[in-house]
Image (cartoon, coloured by chain):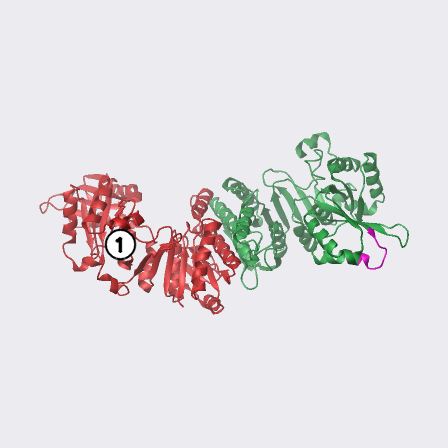
Chain colours: A red, B green
Amino acid sequence: MARIVMKFGGTSMAGIERIRNVAGRVKREAEAGNQVAVVVSAMAGETDRLVQLCREAAPLYDPREYDVVVASGEQVTAGLLAMTLQGMGLNARSYMGWQLPIRASGHAAALIEGIDVAVLERVFDDDGIAVIPGFQGVTSDGAVATLGRGGSDTSAVALAAAMKADRCDIYTDVDGVYTTDPRIVPKAKKLDFVTYEEMLELASVGAKVLQTRSVGLAMRTKMPVQVLSSFEDRPGTLIADEAAIEGQIMERNVITGIAHDRNEALITLVDLPDTPGTVAAIFGPLAKANINVDMIVQSVRQAGEASDLTFTVPNASLAQAVAELEKAKGKIGFKEIITNMEIAKVSAVGVGMRSNAGIAAQMFEALAERRINILAITTSEIKVSVLIPEEYTELAVRVLHSAFGLDAEADSAGAAA
Amino acid sequence: MARIVMKFGGTSMAGIERIRNVAGRVKREAEAGNQVAVVVSAMAGETDRLVQLCREAAPLYDPREYDVVVASGEQVTAGLLAMTLQGMGLNARSYMGWQLPIRASGHAAALIEGIDVAVLERVFDDDGIAVIPGFQGVTSDGAVATLGRGGSDTSAVALAAAMKADRCDIYTDVDGVYTTDPRIVPKAKKLDFVTYEEMLELASVGAKVLQTRSVGLAMRTKMPVQVLSSFEDRPGTLIADEAAIEGQIMERNVITGIAHDRNEALITLVDLPDTPGTVAAIFGPLAKANINVDMIVQSVRQAGEASDLTFTVPNASLAQAVAELEKAKGKIGFKEIITNMEIAKVSAVGVGMRSNAGIAAQMFEALAERRINILAITTSEIKVSVLIPEEYTELAVRVLHSAFGLDAEADSAGAAA
């Protein structure tokens, strides 16, 4: 007997037929003797619809009332799944965020502060199944709170941690985490295991299987998370810490996956004076405006001479960043701003990198062979990222996927494509 | 300054443009210095959609989970209206049934047990506006409860009574209560006043402006209810007790309105034995099966001889009623069952009837003149109902509307039509 959380995303809950399919999976786990709590998303498209209504109602809507509106999508699917499970003869009931309660602080992007499990323990003692709407909680003053888009993943992991579950299974419309985007590389392989750290790097640079926040929470609480398909009966990908998957790590590739991200824009400040305080004058205002600066490259010429500074910001923040910099132009002292949105970041990720020098060199070599120009480089302990012209994105991902030995054999490629 | 409840139905809340219109009306009342609580329905069609989802999920759905699902429609409109009001610069907030709380018992057709107004009093002290989803409450064990279709009217009246409001304004897609259905009689007039008793008779025999339950509650709590249009700026109909509208009653017609109802079916049991216990043997099983028997006519011939018994049941219960009677045939002893769904009930309603003998006679005479056959008659203190062949419904309604002097003058007829 295990204690598990099963989480189903919006595509899995889109319509009664799919909810019935979900109920079948829950039934199987319950009848295998497991204690099951189910976390559900709203039907695919429903949260978008509700958000759109809020925007139309008031462009600067109150986040508190926004939460009242958008939390309703998960309320509907939780009730529907509970009654479907009952119709299959199971002892199931829904519990809203305010009923457990799932204590949260803030609105629209609330943080989970804690989950009371007394109700759940009674449900399990009674051989029951609890169905819990994801994405929602209740504040200390009794208001509905929601966790931000994709928050149901975080709900599931937080619930699993609170109820000391053996694992948290995230059912979605893909069957796991891949070595890279299979739409770009048909030979991409599904990974059996991935560490939390790798998953964080893969998610934040473009792999959208899980909300990044939920991976961070799983890492902190050491909760093993399994990503698997709602629609197929195949093993998924287990996300856990290195220790938990130690037996397998011997056979793992040095590089686990290749990620890419087209959502960055490049800013170059031309002819900066070489005086102390220039860098602070640049990044201070951007930080104040909540603009996330990622890669930074400074080309210093001779001491005392002017130099250029290049860095990236999210596409969506480019206009605001330029405005902030123009405002501070007198203080910074640059001559010109050049911007470029036609760039992409491609990253090689893998915990094996720690014990393997030369990964960066191998990467630059593979790209140089195809004459792909590298605009900037950043590295972390388990990741090397390069900035390249956007038109080379797919080529670069394919080249690196091959170069690091990630391409699937011919027979398994069919399944992955 | 007055303390008022404003209730808006599904047509009034159908989409952001209409919600903005509703917000404008709320704003006007608030800026006139009134203390306002707003009760809202789900967007038109939304509750039907949610009920349909429940039916598809599980034909015999759990009423408790049904309530979780269907209560979401009002949650959405309450949040949207609150943020729209805020966008107009007003201090508004939504309060769900479980937040006030609105205490209720039962599921799917729950009864309101009480409403705590402490939160509302604080809102009013703070010059705030409370937006409350209709149709929902919370049970003593913390589950969501809904009041049954049309329940938002009852929510509004109960809330008005609890907060000792001066009146409860029900905004809907018609501009008041009419002397009869304007689709049948273009000369139907909007009534300025109608008593609770008249409204109950008019509602239960076919006028669908207000949920019958809400009228009963308004009568018991002596809450003046005003029915008026969300879309036009015209006075509506005030529903109150006779004392409250005494000044006007002098000028009122003896008959207030003509109602009709096509949802009844006639059952005739042929050749019943004239023995004690026969009537009990007939109506006992029907009562047990929760079948509502309305009009009853017994034609007694000579003492000791067999007679026929005729009565009506709702159309929807006819098949079940016949089955129950066939089961009890041996005990009852009738020879044959004849059924007829092609009937209609037409009623003249008015508190003035109490002091005016001869209304029934006047009614029969008017119908006889047009050769409309009367199949059965029932009377109450303020109502005379006749059962007629269905094909004569419109003619009978028009004839009675004229006979009792209800037709509008030419100039006001245009507005009513």
Res A244 → quadrant: bottom left
User: Which residues lie in the magenta part?
Assistant: B271-282
Depicted B340 relative to depicted A28: above or below: above
Q: Can residue A285 be seen?
A: no
User: Residue furthest toward the bottom?
Assistant: A125
Q: Position of residue B69 (x, y in %)?
A: 52, 53
Depicted B125 relative to depicted A35: above or below: above
Q: Amino acid at mark 1?
A: Glu
User: Residue furthest toward the left?
Assistant: A302
**Nearer-the-camera pick, A336 or A281:** A336
Viewed as shown, does residue A105 lie left or right of B1? left
**Nearer-the-camera pick, A182 or B132:** A182
User: Residue furthest toward the front?
Assistant: A411
Specify whether residue B273 is painted magenta: yes
Q: Residue at x 37, y 57 (%)?
A: A170
Element assignment for label 1: helix
Q: Residue at x 19, y 53 (%)?
A: A379
Mark 1: few, some, or many residues within 10 Å (few <14, many ≥20)? many
Q: Position of residue A92 (x, y in %)?
A: 50, 61
Q: How many marks?
A: 1
**Nearer-the-camera pick, A237 or B323:** B323
